[in-house]
Image: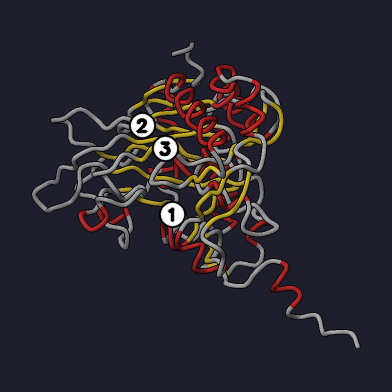
């Protein structure tokens, strides 16, 4: 493993208390309407030290990009007495909505927070292991390893717009303190690419792979199950990556592509770093060139039957323009329409005789 590249910061007790004072009484808007987002932005700029603000906002630029940023000692709600299922909101199991306000406020410094309705139903997604989803390769699964991937990688290709998030925020809410916390792995592809041969790189830069489209998105867009694409675009020091190593998501077109992909996978594992998303730990992952993974684990439950493991998540995008043709559930929670994109446009253009 190479030197650490994840930036890790610990908030002072003074700043933590100031965040509680400023954000505890703000009414969480599960739809993420504009007034709510702007209020959070205003407050977070007033509270955080300039150095931390600059670290986060620099992810909007092109230089000095961090693969991931870990912020410790972030405040969450004082009382946690359960955890939600996919259909439930987190407020039902906490003394308030401080954690929702905090994760959204931090996310608003990096980009535009948003949610896709069928991935979370509200602006802040609640990730808890569910018995009916235990073998799913999602944030609700547990009994399978969620290997290294770019979140929604294939959504870079389903239409003229890029629907994949540029970044993700995770905030630890609850764990079972009796057992070792589940590990999440972060891999900066810029480090991994240094381990590959010129031949492997040439293969990875070519359209030599088929990438599975997430099932729900495939249904909505009436799309083929896979898109043909390259794994890498851009320069080696600022690559755009499209890859997912779990559940046969990638299909190389030939033997050379299979070998190059295996070498890339091995380099990713060798250069990855492990973190544990525990309560009061906020994690940002740059989804353009940073892969993340989660180990398999066996969930534990409290006396109510609620999973102990509870992580909140927010997607961010440079802007919301890509979602302009989607149905909005209100604010920044989007539900994709079918038949959008250029085919949708052509359907409204009459034929010229």
Spot occupied by residue 144 in the image (x, y as percentages of width and height)? 28, 43
Query: Which one is in front, 63 or 35?
Result: 63
- Name the disc covering residue 184, or none: 2
Query: Which comes sooner in the sequence, label 3 or label 1?
Result: 3
- Name the disc covering residue 27, or none: 1
Residue sitting farthest toward the bottom:
353
Tell me the distance, in whole angstroms, between the alpha carbons under discs 3 and 1. 13 Å
Query: Which one is in front, 349 or 48?
Result: 349
Spot occupied by residue 130 in the image (x, y as percentages of width and height)? 24, 53
In the rendered view of the protein, which quadrant contains the C terminus? bottom right
As drawn, 180 above or below 298 = above
Q: Residue at x 68, y 66 (%)?
A: 341
As drawn, 266 above or below 328 = above
Q: Secondary structure at mark 1?
A: loop
Query: Which comes sooner in the sequence, label 2 or label 3?
Result: 3
Q: Which residue is mark 3?
A: 21
Query: Which comes sooner in the sequence, label 2 or label 1?
Result: 1
As drawn, 114 above or below 9 = below
Residue sitting farthest toward the front:
255
Classed neighbour count for the residue bearing mark 1: other residues with Cα under 10 Å, few (<14), some (14–19), many (≥20): few
Tell me whether circle 3 and circle 1 mark residues in contact (CB < 8 Å): no
């Amino acid at each position: 493993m190479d030197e650490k590249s994840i930036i890790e910061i610990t908030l002072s007790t003074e700043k933590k208390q100031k965040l509680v004072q400023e954000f505890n009484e703000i009414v969480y808007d599960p739809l993420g309407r504009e007034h709510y987002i702007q209020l959070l932005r205003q407050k977070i700029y007033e509270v955080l030290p300039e150095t931390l603000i600059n670290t986060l906002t620099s992810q909007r630029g092109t230089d000095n990009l961090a693969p991931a940023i870990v912020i410790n000692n972030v405040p969450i709600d004082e009382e946690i007495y359960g955890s939600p299922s996919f259909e439930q909101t987190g407020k039902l199991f906490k003394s308030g909505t401080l954690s929702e306000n905090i994760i959204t406020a931090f996310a608003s410094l990096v980009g535009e927070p948003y949610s896709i309705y069928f991935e979370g139903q509200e602006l802040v997604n609640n990730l808890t292991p569910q018995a009916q989803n235990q073998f799913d390769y999602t944030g609700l699964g547990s009994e399978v390893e969620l290997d290294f991937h770019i979140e929604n990688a294939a959504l870079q290709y389903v239409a003229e717009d890029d629907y994949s998030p540029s970044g993700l925020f995770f905030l630890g809410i609850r764990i079972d303190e009796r057992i070792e916390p589940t590990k999440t792995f972060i891999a900066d592809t810029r480090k991994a690419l240094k381990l590959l041969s010129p031949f492997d790189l040439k293969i990875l830069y070519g359209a030599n792979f088929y990438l599975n489209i997430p099932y729900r998105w495939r249904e909505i867009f009436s799309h083929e199950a896979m898109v043909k694409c390259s794994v890498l675009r851009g320069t080696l020091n600022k690559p755009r990556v499209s890859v997912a190593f779990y559940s046969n998501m990638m299909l190389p077109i030939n033997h050379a592509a299979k070998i190059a992909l295996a070498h890339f996978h091995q380099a990713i594992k060798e250069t990855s770093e492990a973190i544990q998303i525990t309560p009061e730990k906020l994690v940002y992952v740059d989804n353009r060139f940073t892969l993340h993974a989660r180990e398999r684990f066996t969930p534990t439950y409290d006396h109510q039957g609620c999973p102990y493991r509870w992580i909140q998540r927010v997607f961010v995008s440079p802007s919301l323009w890509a979602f302009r043709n989607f149905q909005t559930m209100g604010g920044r929670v989007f539900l994709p329409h079918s038949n959008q994109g250029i085919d949708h446009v052509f359907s409204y253009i009459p034929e010229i005789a």
